[in-house]
Image (cartoon, helix red, strand yellow):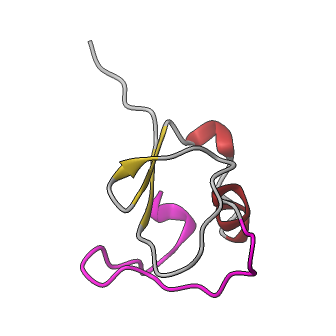
Amino acid sequence: MRKYLPGYNAETGHSVEIEPGSTIRDVARLFFIPEAEVKLIMLDGVSAQWDTVVSGNERLAFFPPVGGG
């Protein structure tokens, strides 16, 4: 997902201001992250869904599908 946020540093993360009532989907749209490219969403280390409302100060992570076999 780093391709949507050039210069992203995993050590420090990235802060963004959100409107009250914003969902994870709203945050992803701020960075133009296509939903089809996200397989797993983590909010403060716990699996979350696109419609989960965020309140601020959480750590949000998007993970792409991984191939293997």
Quadrant containing the C terminus in the rendered view? top left
- Residue plotted at (37% across, 31% down): 66
- Residue plotted at (55% across, 79% down): 56
Q: Quadrant of residue 7?
A: bottom left
In the rendered image, residue 38, in percent from the top left (x then y), is placed at 54, 42
Is residue 62 inside the magenta stretch?
Answer: no
Left or right: where does residue 4 sit relative to residue 51? left
Give whichever of 23, 64 is nearer the camera: 23
Q: Is residue 48 above or below residue 54?
A: above
Q: Quadrant of residue 18?
A: bottom right
Q: Is residue 54 above or below residue 17?
A: above
Q: Is residue 63 above or below residue 65?
A: below
Dominant secondary structure of the residues highlighted in magenta in the image: loop
- Residue plotted at (73% across, 69% down): 22
Left or right: where does residue 16 sit relative to residue 58? right
Is residue 10 inside the magenta stretch?
Answer: yes
- Residue plotted at (71% across, 71% down): 30
Number of numbered discs on residues: 0
Give whichever of 68, 35 is nearer the camera: 35
Give whichever of 49, 33 is nearer the camera: 49
Q: Is residue 8 above or below residue 34?
A: below
**Magenta span of residues:** 1-22
In the rendered image, residue 63, in percent from the top left (x then y), is placed at 43, 47
In the rendered image, residue 2, in percent from the top left (x then y), is placed at 45, 64
> Farthest residue in the top direction?
69
